[in-house]
Image (cartoon, rainbow, N blue to C red):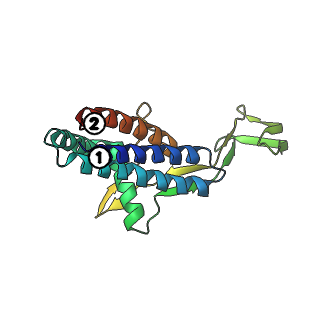
Amino acid sequence: MKQKGFRKAHDEIADAKQAARRMASAGSLDEAEREWRVFLEHFARMFNKLHLACRDDPRAFPWYGRKKHEREQDETLVYLLQARHSNEHSLDDITEQAPSFLSIGAAGEEVIIRELRIDGKGNLSGAVSGKPKVTITKGPAKLKLLPVTNRGVTYQPPKEELVAELEATPWRICETAIAYAEQLLQEASQFLDK
């Protein structure tokens, strides 16, 4: 395997990591959305560089073929590739900005709000009562992954592995993808030219 191609693949994952970190600490959803798109580009480019590094090596190329097949079968890796393609080759949105929310009670419950205060940090206080006991739920604004369609095929965002109903966040997917890529590059290093 060509050292130069391996280094470039490694650099792409380093850039993808940086984009993921910037996304996680973004000051706005617009900024997080931009970094998600940057992450997708670098993650896809890592595979392209690895392919170029392996293609003329009779030891590395069969290994790369197996990894390419793995990428085509894994729900998260397929979604990442297709989201990148959709972002690059269409005008469709790949994310949606879900606003923050405040929920008081449940549908059909009686709720009496005597006083409700929300301070500058989003903390709630006040006098709320109802039957049965009233619950107050608040949630932050978040970036939601959308299904993406390429060539007439729609790809759903992957679900969290442990809780199937829970949608995966871009940050969690980045963590999973980066861990996979680091393992992939570790395996690839066995084929480096001496």
**Residue 146 is drawn in which quadrant?**
bottom left
Where residue 50 is drawn, which disc sits there? Answer: 1
Q: Position of residue 76 (x, y in %)?
A: 36, 43
Q: Position of residue 117 (x, y in %)?
A: 84, 43
Task: Inspect this view and state whether residue 156 appears.
Answer: no
Q: Nearer the viewer, residue 153 or 44?
A: 44
Taking 2 as reference, is 27 left or right? right
| Outermost bottom residue | 91
Within 10 Å of disc 2 (Cα), the crowding (few <14, some 14-19, many 20+) is some
Q: Quadrant of the N terminus?
A: top left
Q: Is residue 154 above or below residue 170?
A: below
Disc 1 secondary structure class: helix
**Looking at numbered disc 2 in the image, what kind of residue is underneath it?**
Ala
Within 10 Å of disc 1 (Cα), the crowding (few <14, some 14-19, many 20+) is many
Where residue 134 is drawn, which disc sits there? Answer: none
Q: Position of residue 16 (x, y in %)?
A: 46, 47
| Contact? badges 1 and 2 (CB < 8 Å) | yes
Q: Position of residue 40 (x, y in %)?
A: 43, 52
**Residue 3 is drawn in which quadrant?**
top left
Mark 1 to mark 2: distance in Å?
8 Å
**Looking at numbered disc 1 in the image, what kind of residue is underneath it?**
Leu
Which residue occupies 46% across, 50% down?
Answer: 39
Q: Nearer the viewer, residue 92 or 129?
A: 92
Q: Looking at the image, is mark 1 or mark 2 earlier in the sequence?
A: 1
**Residue 77 is drawn in which quadrant?**
top left
Which residue occupies 73% across, 41% down?
Answer: 110
Q: Nearer the viewer, residue 63 or 153?
A: 63
Disc 2 secondary structure class: helix
Q: Quadrant of the C terminus?
A: top left
Residue of label 2: 188
Task: Inspect this view and state whether residue 151 appears.
Answer: yes
Which residue occupies 38% across, 43% down?
Answer: 10
